[in-house]
């Protein structure tokens, strides 16, 4: 995936609002799709530091919750998806953790966390998925926000 494509996703997936109900719907979208496709994932949606939705399907481990926290921290620090930050730094041949002087126990530049942006406000939270490849985690988060965008246009 190209950096320009990731930036375009972030621009396109700006929401009009992000309520508790919308977080629930996006979370349920992820869980329903994962169950249909027999995927072992954990998903979290947060707004302003408050966890609005969390679920972990069979086959996940407690470690998924740590991956979610660490990937989400990257998004909240930079305002870009965790996959974008990974590819951005790889393209510059540098370590994310060294460049930004962050502890790997608190930050993971692995795909799967995506910023939740609200028009006229900016980044208000994250949707984060763990359990698949980082690209698949990222895409499932994008699909969930695309679903919300269609529902509330």
Image (tube, grey):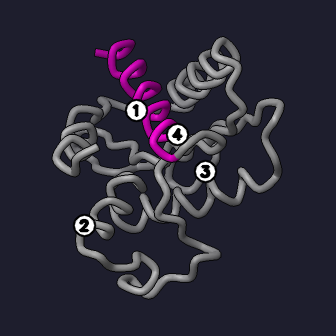
Height in image: 146 above or below 112?
above
The residue labelled by disc 4 is: 137
Give the mark, 1 or 3, whose residue is nearer the N terminus.
3
Q: Is residue 68 left or right of residue 56?
A: left
Name the mark on residue 75: none
Question: Residue 50 has which mark?
Answer: 3
Q: Earlier in the sequence, mark 1 or mark 2?
A: 2
Residue 25 percent location from the top left of the image: 56, 21
Q: Split into 4 quadrants, where in the image is the N terminus? A: top left
Q: Mark 2 — residue?
A: 91
Q: Nearer the viewer, mark 1 or mark 3?
A: 1
Q: Residue at x 30, y 29 (%)?
A: 16
Q: Main secondary structure of the magenta part?
A: helix
Q: Residues within 10 Å of mark 3 (few under 14, many from 20)?
A: few
Q: Which sits earlier in the primary sequence, circle 3 or circle 2? A: 3
The residue pinned by badge 1 equals: 142
Query: As drawn, is 101 to the left or to the right of 99?
Result: right
Distance (Cα) linking label 1 and label 4: 9 Å
Q: Secondary structure at mark 4?
A: helix
At x 66%, y 12%, the residue is 36
Mark 4 or mark 2: whose residue is earlier in sequence: 2
- Please identify, in this view, whether the residue under mark 1 or under mark 2 is nearer the observer: 2
State the SS at label 3: strand
Q: Are marks 1 and 2 in contact (CB under 8 Å)?
A: no
Q: Are marks 4 and 2 in contact (CB under 8 Å)?
A: no
Distance between mark 1 and mark 2 Cα atoms = 22 Å
Q: Residues within 10 Å of mark 1 (few under 14, many from 20)?
A: many
Per the model, the C-alpha gap separating discs 4 and 3 is: 21 Å
Considering depth in this image, is 111 or 18 the residue closer to the camera? 111
Residue drawn at the location 72% of the way across and 51% of the way down: 64
């Amino acid at each position: 995936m190209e950096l320009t494509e990731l930036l375009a996703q972030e621009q396109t997936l700006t929401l009009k609002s992000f309520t508790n109900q919308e977080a629930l719907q996006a979370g349920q979208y992820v869980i329903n799709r994962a169950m249909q496709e027999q995927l072992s994932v954990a998903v979290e949606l947060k707004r302003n530091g408050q966890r609005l939705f969390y679920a972990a399907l069979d086959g996940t481990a407690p470690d998924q919750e740590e991956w979610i926290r660490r990937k989400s921290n990257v998004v909240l620090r930079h305002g870009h998806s965790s996959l974008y930050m990974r590819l951005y730094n790889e393209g510059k041949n540098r370590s994310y953790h060294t460049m930004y002087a962050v502890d790997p126990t608190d930050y993971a530049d692995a795909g799967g966390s995506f910023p939740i942006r609200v028009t006229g406000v900016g980044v208000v939270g994250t949707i984060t998925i763990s359990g698949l490849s980082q690209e698949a985690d990222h895409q499932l988060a994008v699909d969930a926000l695309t679903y919300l965008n269609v529902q509330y246009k």
